[in-house]
Image: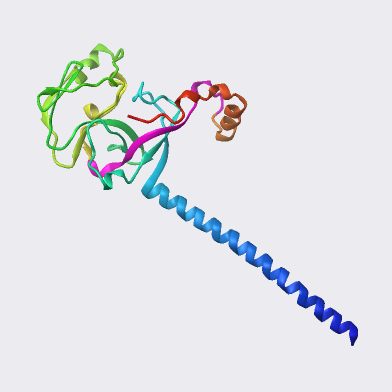
Amino acid sequence: MGKSVKEERGARTEAPAAHRSKSVLREYAEALIIAVLLALVIRTFVVQAFKIPSGSMLPTLQIGDHILVNKFLYYFRPIQRGDIIVFKFPQDETRDFIKRVIALPGETLEIRGKQVFVNGAPINEPYAVFGDWPASRLGEREKLGPIVVPPDRLFMMGDNRDHSMDSRVWGLLDINKVKGKAFVVYFSVRTDDIPYNSPVMSIYHVVSHPGLIRWGRLGNLVH
């Protein structure tokens, strides 16, 4: 009789421990679910990370720059000329492009040589650079317009003018395809010096060769 009472008491003392274990697991699970949901909400509506894979925005953005894009800014203010924005590529919406806004809806745009005119006035573009685009193609890029940008459309150009596939090639951008405004470089690495295609090996190579990181670009504002 005494033995059975002792076993019963032991069972009673073990129950709270099992309950506590289930509570801890439930707390971790709830915290994980909340974290995932918050991450999805932030990525969808607030901020999203992108990597720069090409040199069309040189020297403003380097190949291997990792940037953050503000996705809610344009709920509070309109797009402005000079904004660097990420958008769905009109010819393949599974791809994301990044370019600079040059002309807004209702504005008249004209390109003469290396000078861009908006509403008849030349605009100052200290960010623009020009390279060695083949002579056979220069005519397509050095003369355009004047054209009036229709409502809900934008004229986009890369800062690396002779090496950018932009509105001079594929036309005007539907404003509804805009994802957000680039605002900061949070990481940057010299990708040409990474010999691996595997993401895991690439990360290992960067960690073991910190000289590949462009430390001076980390935290740079995009403008």
Give the residue displayed 55% in from the left and 34% down from the top. Answer: 199
Classify residue 85 by image quadrant: top left
Give the residue furthest to the right.
2
Depth check: give the residue in front, 132 or 73: 73
Q: Percent position (x, y) of residue 2?
A: 90, 85
Depth check: give the residue in front, 96 or 107: 107
Q: Percent position (x, y) of residue 218?
A: 46, 29
State yes or no: residue 194 in magenta.
Answer: yes
Q: Percent position (x, y) of residue 120?
A: 9, 24
Give the residue displayed 20% in from the left and 36% down from the top. Answer: 154
- Which quadrant does the N terminus fall into? bottom right
Give the magenta range. 175-196
State yes or no: residue 178 in magenta.
Answer: yes
Give the residue displayed 27% in from the left and 38% down from the top. Answer: 90
Q: Is residue 148 above or below residue 176?
A: above
Q: Percent position (x, y) of residue 223?
A: 32, 29
Counting labels gives: 0
The answer to whether residue 52 is seen in the rendering is yes
Side (left or right) of 196 relative to 7: left
Q: Is residue 75 above or below residue 205?
A: below
Give the residue displayed 55% in from the left and 56% down from the top. Answer: 32
The answer to whether residue 214 is seen in the rendering is no
